[in-house]
Structure formats: structure tokens, C-alpha cells
Amino acid sequence: MIRSGPVTAAAAVLVAVLVAASCGANARGTAARVMSVPPTAASGDEGAGRVTTTDASTTTPGSTQPDLTSSAAAPGTTTTLAAASTATAAKPTTTRAATTTAAAPLSAVTVITETVLDPTRSTPARGTTPAHQGRSLPTTIYVPTTTAGRHPVVVFAHGYNVTPATYDVMLRGWAAHGFIVAAPLFPISGGGLPGAASESDLNNQPGDMSAVISHLMTASSVTGRIDPSHIAVAGHSDGGTTAGGMAYLPSFRDTRVAAYLLLAADTPATRGAAKVPTLEVCGDADEYRNWPNASGAYHAAGPPVQLLEIVGGRHLTPFIDPGSAGQSVRAALVWFLQWSMQGDASARRQLDALVGAKGLLLLHP
């Protein structure tokens, strides 16, 4: 499944992508860069929006955009890594069309935090914390509370030097539409932790995502509510690169994953590398120049990869903007997940209707 131990050739390729992206012609800035977050969004500064082990909140349905307010409490839990299983996925098709409104939330949402422990892999030093065996992943879990039955799952990887809280409006919206969403805080690249964030541990993050999947399937408080045959992995920026490594590189692949959503990612791809529905999403005005990387991966990989272009979109804002443009982008992501994992023909029609709206979105076949 996911490798452990020394860095493999595939892992070296994944790390090399970051080096090239930081130093080459498509530079996103230095290793100390911080993604810009608009004042209306959850802060991505050091220490802000930090995930704790006892945080929880509840939201209620009824708004047309999925950034709902919260109140309530639920304790976190601590468990260890468990075994894997397999999943299947639907085959995608392609098209483009005109507009509709953003999707409306369907469920109230409760937010809990559980700590996922993987004792089989090590964590490098960060700040005053020495290197040690094992990896500890505080994981924010968004749970739909007013829809019955088992729920599909999205495991989300955050970007460099931020926390899952940066993406609250998007992750909460996914949960409001019936997905259980789990977002770990990475120990080396995550924000709000002692010591400077670093991209040097990126090759270990696919394994962290698999550890979270295992936890959800066997040892979480929501284990009995998840649908293990419908699991997606998503990520933004360096988190998108993490997810892309799982989608495109065999050494990182997790066969339980049924779909991938890569947001402003920078990941190499080769023809036929993707085995399940994969959507590359990027603004063509990305300030870290990730648009050529996303479109290049799409052209290199071929089906079942698709590319959603956000015309004039920047690196982070389209995914967390509370305005109508952000709502449209997030609606497209919801509909892709519903269609790709659940075979929802209505969601596919909604996605097709949204694409091309006033030049905001273009879906490349």
C-alpha cells in the first residue's frame, strides 16, 4: 500500500517537485512562503486556527453557502493505525455548459477532533521537538448529523504553513452535503506548531493520509457511519501535491481511494498514471504559477483525469471566498465528488450546468 522506511525513488520525485517549484522557472517563492488568506477567511498565520484535541462545533442547515456558525462540544480520542482494504470507483465522462447557483447545505454539521497515531513511521525534528518514532496527527472531522445512513468520506490535506481551519468554509460545506470530512494537521508542514514549518517531510504525508483512512475505517467515533467503498482524497497546494502523489505515483497509491480532488497542486503525472476519477482544479492566475503544473499533469496523465480551470482565479481565494464566486467553485467540487464516487447523474448535470458560467469555470475534457 503506502511505503514506510527509507525514501523511495518515487518519494524522491515527489520531494523534487517541491524543490523545483521553489527554485525553478515555476517558482512559488522561498521555502518560508506563507499562503495569503483574505481577512474574511480563517487565518493561516502561525498559531491561528490551530487544531486542538478537544475542539467541536455544530452547524445547522438552511443557508445557501456552506460556511455555517458553530456551538457545542465533543471530546477527542486517541487511537493507533490499522489495516487497509480496497475500493472501486466510477468512470468519468466530460462536457461543459452554462450556469446555476451554488449548492445548498443539506445537513447540520458537528466538528470533532481525534488524534490519529501511526507508530510504524517516524517524525523529523521541528523547533525544540526532537525527532522521534511514530507520527501524531490531530485530525479535524466534520460530521453530517441530520442525514441518516453511512456517508462517503473525504480526507483532506492542507497546504504549507496553515491548518485545516483555513479551509473551514469548504470542508464544512462538503459535510453539509453528506460527506464525512477528515483533515489531519501535518507535523512538519502544518501551521500553528512550535518551530518553523518545512516542506522537507512532504514524502511522508501520503502515508499520513492513509493512516487517517485506516483510523476512520477501524477506530474512529464515526467508524460505524462511514461508507468504506466511497473514500476520496483531496488537498490544496502542498496538500494537493500530497494527494497527487497518491493519485499518480504507484509507491504512494492507496487502493481504498475512489477519487482524487487536487486543488492548485504541483504534481508530476505520466500517461495512464491515474486509476480512478481525478479532478485537477486551479486558477489560471495562481500567484505561485501552479496553473501550468496542473494543466501539464492533466495533459500528461490523460483519462480519467479532468481539469477545472478557474478563470482569473488565484492560489487560495477561490476555495474559501465566502462570496458568490467562491460558492460556485465549491459547488463544482461538491458535484464532482457526488458524481465521481456515487455515480450521481444529477450531480453531473449540475456540474455541467455550472461550468462556463460567465467565464468563471472551464471544464477541460
Image (spheres, rainbow, N blue to C red):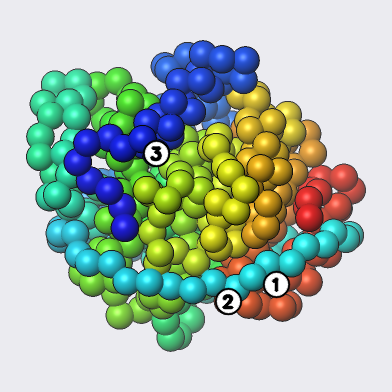
> Rounded to the nearest whole Å, what is the CA distance between mark 1 and mark 2?
9 Å
Query: Could you tell me the amino acid type at mark 1?
Result: Ala
Q: Is residue 171 left or right of residue 47?
A: right
Which amino acid does the dot numbered 2 rest on?
Answer: Gln
Q: As rendered, which of 328 and 23 lies closer to the eye?
A: 23
Residue 232 on image: x %, y %? 48, 62
Tell me if residue 32 comes above or below residue 50 in the rendering. Answer: above
Q: Nearer the viewer, mark 3 or mark 2?
A: 3
Whether residue 126 sits left or right of residue 242 in the image: it is left
Amino acid at the residue labelled 3 = Ala
Secondary element under disc 2, as helix, strand or loop, is: helix
Image quadrant occupied by the N terminus: bottom left
Q: Which secondary structure lies at badge 1?
A: helix
211 left or right, relative to 120: right
Residue depicted at x 64% and y 70%: 91
Query: Contact (CB < 8 A) between labels 3 and 2?
Result: no
Q: CA distance from mark 1 to mark 3?
A: 35 Å
User: Mark 3 — residue?
Assistant: 10
Mark sitting on residue 347? 1
The first of marks 1 and 2 along the sequence is: 2
Q: Marks 1 and 2: CB-CB under 8 Å?
A: yes
Mark drawn on residue 342: 2
**Residue located at (74% from left, 33% from top):** 284
Mark found first going from the N terminus, 1 or 3: 3
Residue 196 % position (x, y): 30, 20
